[in-house]
Image: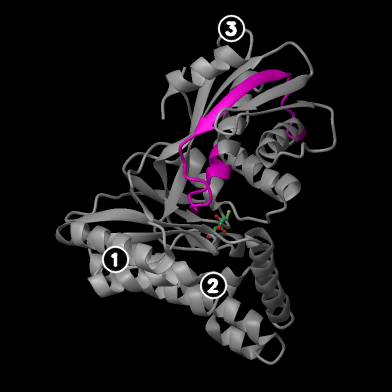
Amino acid sequence: MDIEFVRSRFIKHFDGTTGSVYASPGRINLIGEHTDYNGGFVFPGAVDKGMIAEIKPNGKDKVCAYSIDLKDYVEFGLNEEDAPKASWARYIFGVCREMIKRGVDVKGFNTAFAGDVPLGAGMSSSAALESTYAFALNDLFGDNKIDKFELAKVGQATEHNYCGVNCGIMDQFASVFGKEGHLIRLDCRSLEYQYFPFKPEGYRLVLVDSVVKHELASSAYNKRRQSCEAVVAAIKATHPEVEFLRDCSMDMLNEVKDKVSEEDYKRAEYVIEEIQRVLDVCDALEKGDYETVGQKMYETHHGMSKLYEVSCEELDFLNDIAFDCGVTGSRIMGGGFGGCTINLVKNELYETFISTVKDRYKEKFGRSPKVYDVVISDGSRKLC
Ligand code: GAF
C-alpha cells in the first residue's frame, strides 16, 4: 500500500494541502491465542500490511474523517460523548477520547486513511487503525509524551469502551512494538517482552484465509472471557493469590471441577495448556526445532476447535488439508470464527500445499481461499 495513494485522496477530499502521514501494521501470531486476557504469554509479530493515515489539524474542534476504502465520510465533535454510528469511525473517535483522558490536548483535524490488512482475516485491521491514530495524535498534539505501552493500551481501551470487544493487549502491542524480522514474546501480565529473530531456514510461514467471518464473533469472544473469569473466581475461593488463569495449574482447575460448568472447565483447560505451549514453542525455536513448533501449532488448533470452540467448519477443513499435505504446523490464527490459518510449511512442500488447499477448499465451499506470505515488519511509525 502506498503513501502517494493516501496523499492524493487526502488532497482531493480536503482543502488541497497536505498533512503528516502515519502507519501501523496488522499482526500475525505464531502461538498463544486467547491467552492475553488471561495474563498469559503470546508470540505475535507485525506484518507488512496495515493502515496509513494522513492527518492535518484543521483549527476547529471537530474531526473530519474520510475512509478511502469505504468511500465514507464522518464528522464528530471532540467534546461529543456519543460515538459515531459507522464502526470504522468509532475507532478514531475512541482513540481521540482515550488520548484526551490521558491528558493529550487533542485538537480538531482532517484525516483520510486506507489499509491493505484483509478485513475479517484475523490479522487485526482494527488494532492497526487504533495504533495509527494513537501514534499520530501523540506526535501531533502530545509532544510524544505518552509511551508506547500506553499507546497500545489506548487501542485496547478503544475496543473495550467504544466497540464492545473486551480484548486483550496482544494486537495493539504487536502493532505498536513490531520489529522487522522479529516475533515478540510478550508476557501480557507484566508487559515484559523479548524480540525473537524469526527467519526459519527451509520453511515459509503462510496464511490461508478462509474468507469467512461468522456473525456474533465479538459476543462469543466476550463470552469466552467471562468463562475464564468465572473459573478464576471459583479457584480464588481457595487460592486467593490467583489473579488470572495464568496463575492456575491443571490441579487447581480440577479442584473446582464440580463448581464450574462443563463448558467453563473446557475453556480454562485450553487456556492453561495454551500458555504452556507458548513457552514450549519459544524454547523449541531457540533450538531451531521446527518440528516441535509445528506440533504445538496443531495442538493449539485442536484445543481451539474442541475445547475453546472458536473454530468453524471452514477452518477445521483448512487445518485437515494442511495435515494431509504434511505441513509442519497449522492452526487457526486470532480470535476464531473465521479468518486465517497460519501454516509453517517446508519450502519444498509449499507449491503442492498451496495448489491442494486452493483446489480442495473451492471444491467444498465454492470459493477460493486467499493466501498471504508473512513478512515480519516494523510497528507504528511516521512516514512523512
Ligand atoms: C483478538 C483479540 F483482539 C486479542 O486480544 C486476542 O485475544 C486474540 O483475539 C486471540 O488470541 O485478536
Q: Position of residue 258 (x, y in %)?
A: 69, 92
318 or 373: nearer the viewer: 318
Q: What residue is shown at x 65% (from left), y 66% (from top)?
A: 220
Q: Is residue 25 left or right of residue 234?
A: left
> Is disc 3 placed on a helix, strand or loop?
loop
**Number of numbered discs present?**
3
Q: Is residue 89 left or right of residue 128?
A: right
Q: Position of residue 18 (x, y in %)?
A: 55, 10
- In this rendering, the answer to whether 111 lies above or below 357 is above
Residue 144 visible here: no
> Is disc 1 placed on a helix, strand or loop?
helix
Q: What residue is shown at x 38% (from left), y 40% (from top)?
A: 179
Alpha carbons under labels 1 and 3: distance apart: 54 Å
Name the kind of residue labelled 2 in the image: Val
Answer yes or no: do the residues labelled 2 and 1 have beta carbons within 8 Å? Answer: no
94 or 354: nearer the viewer: 354
Mark linked to residue 101: none
**Circle 1 residue:** 284
Q: Pick the quarter of the image with the N terminus.
A: top left
Dot 1 alpha-carbon crowd within 10 angstroms: few under 14, some 14 to 19, many 20 or more? some
Earlier residue among tags 1 and 3: 3
Q: What residue is shown at x 57% (from left), y 13% (from top)?
A: 12
**Circle 2 residue:** 271
Ligand 1 within 8 Å, label 1 CB? no
The magenta stretch is: 101-128
Name the kind of residue labelled 1 in the image: Ala
**Circle 3 residue:** 16
Q: Position of residue 283 (x, y in %)?
A: 32, 65
Name the outermost residue toward the left.
Answer: 348
- Where residue 11 sits, quadrant-wise, is top right
Earlier residue among tags 2 and 1: 2
The answer to if 48 sits in the magenta stretch is no
